Image (cartoon, helix red, strand yellow):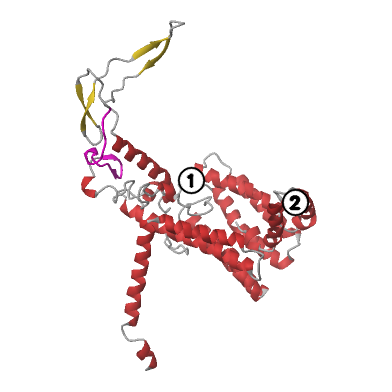
Amino acid sequence: DLFITFFPAGFPLAFSKMKKSAVESYKELVLRDPTIVSRVESVLRTISYIIPGRFAASEELAELLFSLSKMAGFANDSIIREAILSQSQQSLEAATARGPIPTSKKSLLPRLSKRTLLSTLNVLDHVEVFVEMASSRHGERLKWTLIGLMETLRAGCRLALLVRHGSALVAHPPIAVLDRDLLTCETCHRVLGGGVCTHCVPPTLLGSSAAPGVSLPPSAAYTSSPLPALPDESPAVWTCPSCHWTAEQTVAPPPHTHVGRRTARALFTAPSPVRQQSAPCRTCAAQRRRFQRFQTGATALASLPSGPVTRRRLLAELLFILRPLAHLLLRLRLGALAWTPYIVSLALDLISLVLNQTAAMLVGEKREWTRRYQGLLFYLLRSPFYDLFFRDRLLRVLSTLGAVPLVSMIVDALRYYLDVWQKLHTYMWSS
């Protein structure tokens, strides 16, 4: 009776409607002015850089704020990506991403979409460090249990992407961060739909298409003026090849060659000031430039294509996927200062890189291979090599640099963070 008094029968439905209305309002805010949410994300990141070391549990709070900023950015990018792909006539993702490879009906892998698997990997990358830092306060058993679950989930997602969707060398981050400046209007900062701002350009004025998925407005609706007339010249008619707007311009004399007074040589030829018939008007040219900016930013909307998955590449990716799990199991069994987990992990990474180095790699795959190759430098900061050989040398170098006045603040922060990073398994050993 008490529950019915405070929560009537229609409360769940009303709460659902309120929740849906709040979500729709937030989406409208993000699409109307993405700069607002970008500022909020920047403030959260800035605070997370300032507060570490100032009070108890400051590291956990800083990592929480940093994770929240990354998750907020990922959610806002998803809203913008969804809106653009739904407004565009041709989905950029469908045009570039490969379809799922044919598999047997008896496959035990779940039938998850590629976007869901990539989103799961993105979320794991954003929250794993905070989960480890927060769980370490409640005992080592809970900490390593959560780390094992996260590594198992990551390996399962990567395995499903490899086997079911044929995605080798998944990029990091799996879903690229959008460049919102290239996807928003320069005037009103709204998200562009197909390269055209329907708020600044009324839909009733949209004319003929100048590029796939974008329509250009007629220049008569704007202040596009022809070149100024010169005296004693007969007027001519110029037509924009895109929107077919006509305007009067002048017929100028032929190009004039300037001759030097002292050398009597031809120095340069002045072009005719008359607008060429193949050149667009100012409005169409501005719309073309805006659409080119939009295309540059929209490349992050689509999943990068993958090359053919041969047996060699399949083996290389399997070694890369299983490497974190193998290291974690050996570390829990032999200890953090044992050499066996370190050597096995390094060997698996090296073999995977060598097997993946083929001429058939695409541009995105080559970039991810380079990132993994550069990631081998992390083995200098990983135990036991760091504790036994590298730590003292690095601290001596930092102490020498700390004597420089302007560099001392950076060196002190780096020296403090080195000890914090060394204790975090997800930060040092995550793939």
Label disc, if present, on residue 402 of the rendered structure: 2
Give the residue at the far bottom of this rendering.
1
**Residue tagged 1:** 308
Q: CA distance from mark 1 to mark 2?
A: 50 Å
* Left or right position of 67 against 111: right
Left or right side of 159 for 265: left
> Residue 39 location, x and y as percent?
47, 57
Which quadrant of the rendered structure holds the N terminus?
bottom left
Asked if one can make out residue 114 in the rendered structure from this viewpoint, the answer is no
Number of numbered discs overlaid on the protein picture:
2
Residue under the point 53% across and 61% down: 44
Q: Amino acid at mark 2?
A: Gly
Is residue 153 found inside the magenta-colored segment of the image?
no
The residue tagged with tag 2: helix, strand or loop? loop
Q: Quadrant of residue 296?
A: top left
Mark 1 crowd level (few <14, some 14–19, many ≥20, 10 Å Cα): some
Q: Is residue 230 left or right of residue 43?
A: left
Q: Nearest the camera: 425 or 414?
A: 414
Which residues are the magenta region?
209-227
Residue 350 rendering spot, x and y as whole percentages = 65, 49
Q: Residue at x 35, y 61 (%)?
A: 28
Q: Which of the two labelled residues, at mark 1 and mark 2, occupies the earlier sequence position?
A: 1
Q: Going 77% across and 58% down the picture, which residue do you hit? A: 387
Determine the secondary structure under disc 1: loop
Q: Position of residue 186 (x, y in %)?
A: 38, 46
